[in-house]
């Protein structure tokens, strides 16, 4: 698939099943991620590949985090939190490894990791896979961040759920004029 076609035809898909990208394809996805813009070559990212039983471990972390945030969470709520990690056969967690730097503000490092995540999503789509980038409370939860090895300044940019689409997504056509204007000074 050509690059422009991959970008213009990619759409998030929440209903995912096996197969997921193979080990070799995952390596290619990470290589694509590492081509993201990166001011001063900081490499401000870390990619956690979560598959097989490790998804259940991640689900336990999600459940524990919910219980810490909401001690009154009932078993149905905890079960739902734990099941989120099983929505796809593969999850790649993208963490912005943020450091103090005289030329590169923290926001640029987070944006760089976000661009790396988007490269993964587009590359996976170009390989014939589907996925969805999820964030929400787990990205900002201290328990989840600590369990995944994120340091104090680090930011979980997202959980990239990848696999094979159970149904073909519908692409909407929107006029670019709704989002673009020419600035003339």
Image (cartoon, helix red, strand yellow):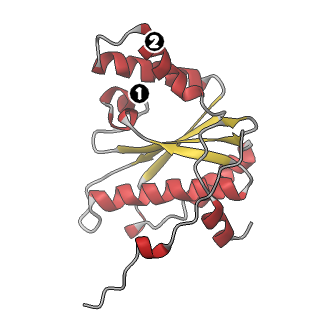
Q: Name the quadrant of the N terminus.
A: bottom right
Residue 49, above or below 39: above
Q: Give residue 85's quadrant in the image.
A: top right
Could you tell me residue 164's position as x and y percent? 72, 42
> Which of the labelled discs sits on residue 147, or is there none?
1
Q: Residue at x 68, y 41 (%)?
A: 163
Q: Position of residue 17 (x, y in %)?
A: 71, 34
Q: Is residue 103 above or below residue 182?
A: above
Q: Secondary structure at mark 1?
A: helix
Callout 1: few (<14), some (14-19), or many (20+) C-alpha neighbours within 10 Å?
few
- Across and down, in percent, residue 95 comes to 43, 45
Residue placed at 45% from the left, 44% from the top?
Answer: 158
Mark 2 lies on residue: 76
Give the left or right position of residue 84, taking residue 150 as reference. right
Q: Can you tell which of label 2 and label 1 is closer to the viewer?
A: 2
- Quadrant location of the C terminus in the rendered image: bottom left
Identified at 28% across, 57% down, the residue is 106
Task: State the SS at label 2.
Answer: helix
- What is the quadrant of residue 177 in the picture? bottom left
Mark 2 Cα within 10 Å, few/some/many (few <14, many 20+)?
few
Q: Is residue 43 visible?
A: no
Residue 106 is labelled as none
Q: Residue 27 at x, y = what percent? A: 67, 50
Sooner in the amino-acid sequence: mark 2 or mark 1: 2
Q: Quadrant of residue 140?
A: top left
- Please state which of residues 34 and 165 is positioned toward the viewer in this rendering: 165
């Amino acid at each position: 698939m050509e690059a422009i076609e991959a970008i213009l035809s990619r759409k998030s898909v929440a209903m995912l099943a096996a197969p997921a990208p193979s080990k070799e394809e995952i390596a290619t996805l990470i290589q694509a991620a590492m081509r993201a813009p990166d001011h001063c070559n900081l490499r401000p990212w870390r990619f956690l590949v979560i598959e097989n039983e490790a998804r259940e471990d991640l689900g336990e972390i999600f459940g524990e985090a919910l219980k810490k945030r909401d001690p009154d969470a009932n078993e149905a709520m905890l079960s739902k939190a734990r099941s989120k990690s099983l929505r796809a056969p593969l999850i790649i967690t993208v963490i912005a490894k943020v450091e103090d730097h005289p030329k590169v503000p923290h926001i640029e490092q987070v944006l760089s990791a976000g661009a790396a995540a988007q490269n993964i999503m587009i590359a996976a789509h170009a390989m014939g896979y589907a996925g969805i980038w999820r964030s929400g409370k787990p990205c900002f939860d201290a328990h989840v961040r600590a369990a995944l090895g994120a340091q104090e300044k680090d930011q979980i940019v997202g959980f990239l759920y990848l696999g094979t689409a159970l149904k073909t997504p519908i692409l909407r056509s929107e006029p670019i004029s709704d989002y673009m204007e020419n600035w003339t000074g």
